[in-house]
Image: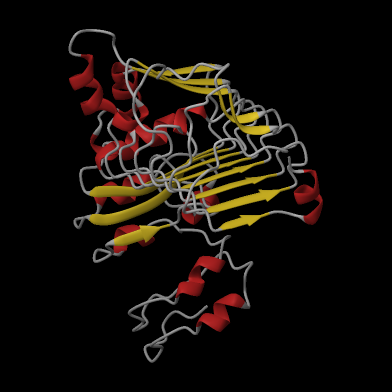
């Protein structure tokens, strides 16, 4: 407990590194103006009730990708006799009830109801969003109308910079689709264009097999996406949908055990026939623990990695060919001695 210390001006970062299991930190009635970056090491830190409501000058709140997902929808949610739990957990109501705006919010959400509530806050700019432990249908089809119904509006998409989907069970196929009508392009741009999204992370979406785009292009949906991390999506068949991303610079694939090729002509992408260049800006490609990966591109002779500078290969012992890797900018290939010896 450090509260009621009117002489306390700062907390050393080294102190916070010594208490990684800390869950409660009370700095009320101190004169601390800023916290050190080491605060991020306190992954178990909880946000007590009413704390956010009292911080009327708070402009940045970022608990993205932390273990904290216990946001109550409303302050009174929970069992009647669960007084201690109510007092220990913040509610989304506190974000909305503040007089001042939060210009940068990073948050973890674990239910559709919480996501819908968050998207309706006019005084909050959600910049980093992690969807964690959310159940979904086997085939998740995202139409403009369904997305609007899910979120209750589309304003949150305009500010989102970093999106993570983590441990969401049940979803096998994701289909981003237009309406198919004559004005589908305009409607789709209004509904789906995440113009500021730069980072996308898929982690342990264990049953996901395909991601497809229909009646639209991935470039329309993610024009600014620069970095993609796909980890422990064990049943994912390929990453065909990233082929024509105009701004993609970094692609990382870890432990996608069923993936035989990063780009596979035998699988549909929803963008067949497009004349857009392939991987126009991709500088780094990292593949690790991909036990079924036999080639980078299969059956797609026009694919090229024209901007590739770094290729990282780890524990991909079935990968013996580097199809399409002809970039004049390529300066580093990282791999084990064993992998180099079997490379054709």
Residue 42 occupies quadrant:
bottom right
Q: In this view, does 185 lie above or below 287?
A: above
Point out residue 16 in the picture as x, y percentages from the top left corner. Answer: 55, 77
Q: Is residue 15 above or below residue 170?
A: below
Tell me which colouring the rendered structure shows: secondary structure
In the figure, is residue 101 to the left or right of 235? Answer: left
Q: In this view, does 176 lie above or below 277?
A: above
In the figure, is residue 194 to the left or right of 311? Answer: left
Point out residue 138 in the picture as x, y percentages from the top left corner. Answer: 56, 17
Nearest to the observer: residue 189 or residue 118: 189
Which image quarter is the C terminus in?
A: top right
Residue reaching furthest to the bottom: 7
In the figure, is residue 172 to the left or right of 307? Answer: right
Point out residue 155 in the picture as x, y percentages from the top left corner. Answer: 23, 36
Q: Give the residue drawn at x 29%, y 20%.
A: 144
Nearest to the observer: residue 236 or residue 61: 236
In the figure, is residue 168 to the left or right of 49? Answer: right
Point out residue 250 in the picture as x, y percentages from the top left corner. Answer: 48, 48
Nearest to the observer: residue 114 or residue 41: 41
Q: Give the residue drawn at x 32%, y 29%.
A: 151
Q: Give the residue drawn at x 78%, y 41%.
A: 317
């Amino acid at each position: 407990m450090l509260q009621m210390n009117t002489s306390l001006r700062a907390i050393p970062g080294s102190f916070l590194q010594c208490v990684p299991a800390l869950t409660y930190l009370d700095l009320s009635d101190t004169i601390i103006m800023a916290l050190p970056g080491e605060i991020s090491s306190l992954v178990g830190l909880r946000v007590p009730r009413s704390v956010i409501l009292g911080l009327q000058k708070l402009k940045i709140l970022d608990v993205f990708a932390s273990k904290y997902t216990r946001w109550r929808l409303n302050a009174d949610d929970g069992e009647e006799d669960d007084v201690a739990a109510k007092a220990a957990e913040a509610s989304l109501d506190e974000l909305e009830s503040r007089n001042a705006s939060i210009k940068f919010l990073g948050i973890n959400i674990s239910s559709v109801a919480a996501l819908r509530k968050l998207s309706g806050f006019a005084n909050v700019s959600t910049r980093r969003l992690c969807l964690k432990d959310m159940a979904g249908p086997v085939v998740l089809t995202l139409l403009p109308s369904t997305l609007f119904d899910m979120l209750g509006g589309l304003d949150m998409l305009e500010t989102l910079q970093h999106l993570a989907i983590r441990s969401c069970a049940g979803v096998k196929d994701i289909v981003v689709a237009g309406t198919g009508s004559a004005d589908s392009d305009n409607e789709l741009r209004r509904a789906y264009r995440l113009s500021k999204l730069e980072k996308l992370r898929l982690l342990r979406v264990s049953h996901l097999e395909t991601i497809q785009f229909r009646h639209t292009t991935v470039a329309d949906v993610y024009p600014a996406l620069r970095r993609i991390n796909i980890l422990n999506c064990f049943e994912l068949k390929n990453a065909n949908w990233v082929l024509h991303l105009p701004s993609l610079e970094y692609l990382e694939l870890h432990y996608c055990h069923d993936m035989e090729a990063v780009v596979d002509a035998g699988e549909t992408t929803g963008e067949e026939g497009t004349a857009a260049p392939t991987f126009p800006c991709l500088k780094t490609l990292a593949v690790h623990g991909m036990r079924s990966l036999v080639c980078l591109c299969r059956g797609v002779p026009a694919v090229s990695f024209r901007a590739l500078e770094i290729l990282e290969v780890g524990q991909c012992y079935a990968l013996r060919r580097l199809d399409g890797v002809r970039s004049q900018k390529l300066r580093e290939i990282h791999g084990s001695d064993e992998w180099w010896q079997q490379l054709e």
